Amino acid sequence: MPKYRFICSSCEREILIRKSSSTKTIKCACGADMDRQMPRLNDTTTTETVDPYMGVKWQQDQREQLKARKEDHFWRHEVPRLVSSGKYELATLIENGWVTITDDGKIEIQDKPPSKR
């Protein structure tokens, strides 16, 4: 049976008690009816355990992780493809940060985002 929170309408007494889901009201010690309340949500961030052995949590809002994955994929796979395609001039490649020129005059393709270099 689930645990529900009941509040008395006259004396404002509050109790937590296990009752069946069909129970809507119970009697208070003062004789009035206690009404079942909606559950409280203390924390709005819900997580579910993806890997119980390692304790890895999966958060509800994954925007930052998805953004980092997209950025890593772009720099690891797309930038080398764009550089080797020959569609862009060297000045454009350097301006975008896709390639750098070393002191020896060699051109190096960047495969990491600027935030991780």
Image: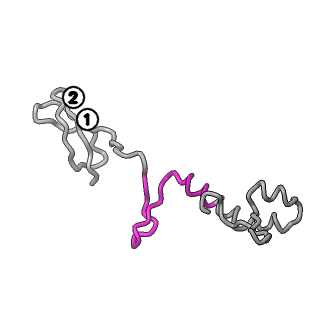
Instruction: Report whether 50 appears left or right of 101.
Output: left
Q: Residue at x 79, y 69 (%)?
A: 107
Q: Is residue 61 magenta?
A: yes
Q: Residue at x 71, y 66 (%)?
A: 110
What residue occupies the far top of the structure in this picture? 10
Q: Secondary structure at mark 1?
A: strand
Residue placed under numbered mark 1 in the picture: 35
Total numbered labels: 2
Amino acid type at mark 2: Ser
> Front-most of 59 and 110?
110
> Front-most of 105 and 74?
105
Image coords of residue 95 (percent x, y): 78, 54
The magenta segment is: 46-69
Label drawn at residue 14: none
Q: Secondary structure at mark 2?
A: loop
Q: CA distance from mark 1 to mark 2?
A: 7 Å
Locate residue 66: give its quadrant.
bottom right
Instruction: Report whether 15 appears left or right of 46.
Output: left
Cβ atoms under marks 1 and 2 closer than 8 Å: yes
Amino acid type at mark 1: Asp
Of callouts 1 and 2, the N-terminal one: 2
Crowding near the residue tagged with mark 2, few <14, some 14–19, many ≥20 C-alpha atoms within 10 Å: few
Residue placed under numbered mark 2 in the picture: 9
> Front-most of 68 and 46?
68
